[in-house]
Image: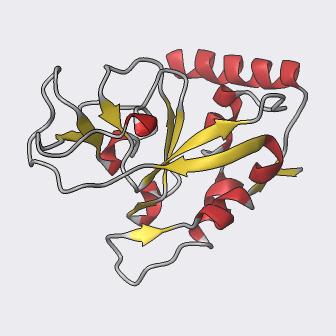
Amino acid sequence: IVSLSDVIADLQNGWSPKCLTRPAESEEWGVLKVGAVSFGWFDEKQNKALPSNLKQREQYEVKAGDLVISRANITQYVGACALVEEVRPKLMLCDKLFRVVWKDDSPILPKYLNEVFKIPHLRWQIENNLTGASPTMKNISKPALMALQFPIPPLEVQTKIVSELSKKREE
């Protein structure tokens, strides 16, 4: 059993400037909305266009391979995560999303961690650490996420688990 802080270097959250109400065009910068990961897969269309008078913050640009985790939403979607497989350029994380910063020698596969966030015991830990009075906007803190505990098998077993889960979903 490990804590999230044992297997990753950090969680980085983004920036939430006042954006336009429409999605960004392909040549424009946009800021992801929390809905980009709400259902367990990454949806780049869930974004708002950055106004032309604001300068983008490239350090928050989402890249393929990022694991993105929601830190705020309704209860059932706090802690929702998605592994970004493909993403168009010029999309930034909002401040309600975390990006996993991996350790160089991390003992966990990104795809395995993505699956771990879906197991009932982890969901229970997340839901028991929520804050916020509004039922439509609950939050979890970075320290609470970093303290989440879960089992971690050897890398070859993680690979097998992820493969089996993928195969079952396809069926």
Q: Is residue 36 above or below residue 107?
A: below
Q: Is residue 140 left or right of residue 10?
A: left
Give the residue displayed 39% in from the left and 46% down from the top.
38
Q: Nearer the viewer, residue 161 or 105?
A: 105
Kindly indicate the quadrant of the structure image that contains residue 132: bottom left
Q: Is residue 91 left or right of residue 82?
A: left
- Where's residue 158, x and y in %? 79, 26
Q: Residue at x 40, y 55 (%)?
A: 95
Residue at 78% across, 18% down: 160
In the depicted structure, whether residue 41 falls above or below residue 147: above
Q: Quadrant of residue 142?
A: bottom right
Q: List x then y, in percent, for residue 73.
A: 38, 61
Q: Is residue 46 among the parts visible in the rendering? A: no
Determine whether 162 is above or below 13 in the image: above
* Residue 171 at x, y percent in the picture: 53, 15
Q: Quadrant of residue 109?
A: top right
Residue 127 at x, y = what percent?
Answer: 57, 67
Q: Nearer the viewer, residue 138 or 143?
A: 143
Residue at (48%, 20%) from the top-left corner? 64
Task: Answer whether residue 142 is visible to the viewer in this image.
Answer: yes
Left or right, 64 with respect to 145, comes to left
Is 159 or 144 nearer to us in this picture?
Answer: 144
Q: Along the horizontal axis of the image, is 82 left or right of 46?
A: right
| Color encoding of the figure | secondary structure
